[in-house]
Image: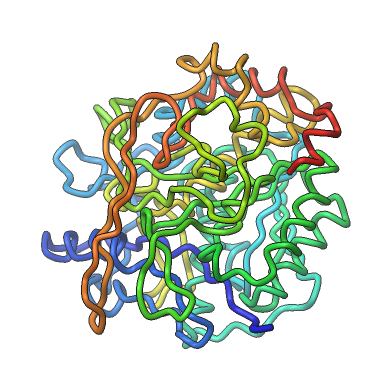
Amino acid sequence: MIQRSIIPRRPSYLIVTNLTMLGLVVSALFSLVGRAHASPNTPYVFQPYNKIASNTPMADPGNTQETFPCQAPTAIQTCYGPSQMRKAYNIQPLLDAGITGKGSTIVIVDAYQAPDIQDDLHSFDKIFGLNDTELNIIAPDGLTPFDPKDFNQVGWSAEISLDVEWAHAIAPDATIDLVLSKTAEDKDLLSALNYVGDENLGDVVSMSFGGNESCTDSAQLWHQAFRNAASKGITLLASSGDSGAAEGSCDGKTAVKGVSYPAADSFVTAVGGTQLYSTDPSVGTYQNEISWQGSGGGFSTSTPKPFYQNSVNSIGKYRGIPDVSYDASPLSGVIIKWSEAPFGLGLYIIGGTSAGSPQWAGIVALAAQDGKSRIGLLNSTIYSSDQQAHYSSNFHDVTSGNNTVISGGLNTKPATIQGYNAGPGWDAVTGWGSPQAAALVPYLANHNALNLPSSDLASL
């Protein structure tokens, strides 16, 4: 059997300082057309770094009272810090009420390592006025020595920085267990996930990686690992992808219509992407959202429609993703502290559905604290008829946009991959939409899925 690599979701890295309009447009295009997953032998290369990005990292404003240039109302590319994101998705009232994730544990599964993550998290906290939290770095099979010349490892270091810092930004008092696999090979990531389940490690797991479900040889082993974790009440989240309705072909030569795994697994809540608009980016006041064109979404060809999606008539015989969404566009990105960056130490704007999965994990951690219990299979709750009766208060329904993409590269002919349209209720671009956390968190706390009928779990 061929062992294929699963690569990290390629976040859309954009450097703020000296970014020209041309660079911005080209970088946005990379987020749409450059996301086909690599074949086993294709290196993971940061095209935006050496092609279009400025070599100057974003400047630190110096204290938490100042704002960044990208938070000005006239900024071409908007950026958000923790306070703005908490405002936009109505998270701050929960934190003010003492629902901060205290007593909950967020597990983040990633590959390789980010040697400076402890220091970067501390710096991130200092810059944005957050309390430090407990970060445990766990490598069940040992760590691969970090090679700053290996773009694959550098990419994962960025993913780690994003995942850790932004899970913490949403649930500032939750413990974070960063579980690292020694490589990005399927077998090593799977080993890390099995460790999480076997050790019953946390309340919620975030995974910002994936590949074309049709190319995943070990899907059944992943599914068994997810079943093991779900049986213990652990909530599982994964980013839905950054290439719209397209995925890379199994030979890595072209793009085809498809969905990402593990996002498409029936035990996993898939997190899609939106572009967030704020009436005041320096504050984060919510204006509206449209679907992000890069939001991975569509329908599985191998995972049957799970019981919790039976109420959605637009879903046929197979699993539809995403289930929920969050801001993901590089034009409305979040700020990270990332010391392994090729351009030197600094703050960077980052986009992609990779940003949504850890923040949703933070929301689940808040709900676990609020309800004094794990939330369990999140999809069972958010697809329930009772939740739909509270839908308008629990979610922002994102109804415009699509995830049709033009895919191609330097050596391939561009091809249009026809996607799906966002619309009222669930859709294959944004799922149910983005969270209104002040209402959604107590709802989840009072409607956890820990007592699901065994027949429902057995059907997955």
Find residue 447 and report its image quarter.
top right
Residue at the limit of the structure toward the front, as seen here: 317
The colour scheme of the drawn protein is rainbow
| 249 vs 92: above or below | below
Residue 196 appears in the figure: yes
The x and y percentages for residue 367 are 67, 28
The residue depicted at 73 percent of the width and 56 percent of the height is 223
Residue at the limit of the structure toward the top, as seen here: 389
Residue 122 appears in the figure: no
| 280 vs 217: above or below | above
Find residue 195 and report its image quarter.
bottom right
Residue at the limit of the structure toward the left, as seen here: 21
The x and y percentages for residue 285 are 33, 26
Quarter of the figure that contains the C terminus: top right
The x and y percentages for residue 302 are 60, 56
The x and y percentages for residue 139 are 76, 70
The residue depicted at 70 percent of the width and 22 percent of the height is 445
Is residue 84 rendered to the left or right of residue 5?
Answer: left
Please tell me which residue lies in front, 212 or 444: 212
Please tell me which residue lies in front, 299 or 278: 299
The residue depicted at 81 percent of the width and 30 percent of the height is 450
